Image: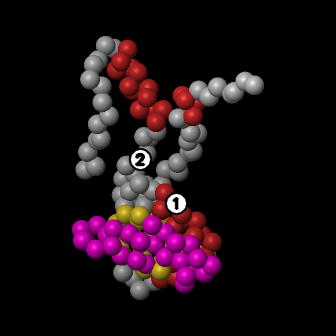
Amino acid sequence: MSEAVLNPDDLEVAPGFEHDFLQGQVFQAASPEELREALEKAFDYRGDVTVTLKDGATVEGYIFDRQSGATLATSKIRMFPKNEAVKRTIVWQDIAGLAFTGRDTAAGKTWEAWLRKYWEKKQAGETNIELKPESLD
């Protein structure tokens, strides 16, 4: 009985997906469906968003969690507000709109792009090649 041979290199690369370029875009909650779609995009966004509430207040920060319920009243986002020490929970029905105001720190940062840069450096004879994060400022 022969066993199938697995190539570990084939297992380590998962297919990526195309990210929308959202920085600077503004969404108004014209319908519950549009709000749900915008909040899903905001959850995947790797930068700050500014949430405008129906009472006119705004909250700028990073959305790190969302819970999608059956209605907007039972759905909520949780975020780290910019320049505040406490997390904030916002019910979706209180949101009038949102804007993608922060820089998307993941834009253009694919595994393939990093790997290409790594091999370019390696072929140029560089040593001690390491992954270094760029400044977020």
Tag 1, which secondary structure? helix
Instruction: Name the residue rendered at 39%, 82% in the picture.
Output: 56
Relative image position of residue 88 (x, y in whole percent): 36, 76
On screen, residue 14 above or below 81: above
Residue under numbered circle 1? 41
Q: Residue shown at 30%/25% (left/top)?
A: 129
User: Residue at coordinates 49% horizontally, 57% vertically from top-left?
Assistant: 44
Q: Mark 2 points at which residue?
A: 106
27 or 76, nearer to the observer: 76
**Residue 128 visible in the current orientation:** yes
In the image, what residue type sits under mark 2?
Ala
* Magenta-colored stretch includes residue 67: yes
Left/right of residue 36 with respect to residue 3 in the rendered view: left
Q: How crowded is mark 1: few (under 14 residues within 10 Å), some or many (20 or more)?
A: some
**Would you say residue 7 sits in the magenta stretch?**
no
Q: 102 or 134, which lies in front?
A: 134
Question: Is residue 96 visible to us here?
Answer: no
| Left or right of 18, for residue 63 | left
Residue 99's x, y, as percent? 43, 65
* Tag 2–tag 1 contact (CB < 8 Å): no
Q: Nearer the viewer, residue 41 or 130?
A: 130
Secondary structure at badge 2 equals: loop
Q: In this view, does 42 lie to the left or right of 72?
A: left
Q: Where is residue 42 in the image (x, y as percent from the top left)?
A: 48, 62
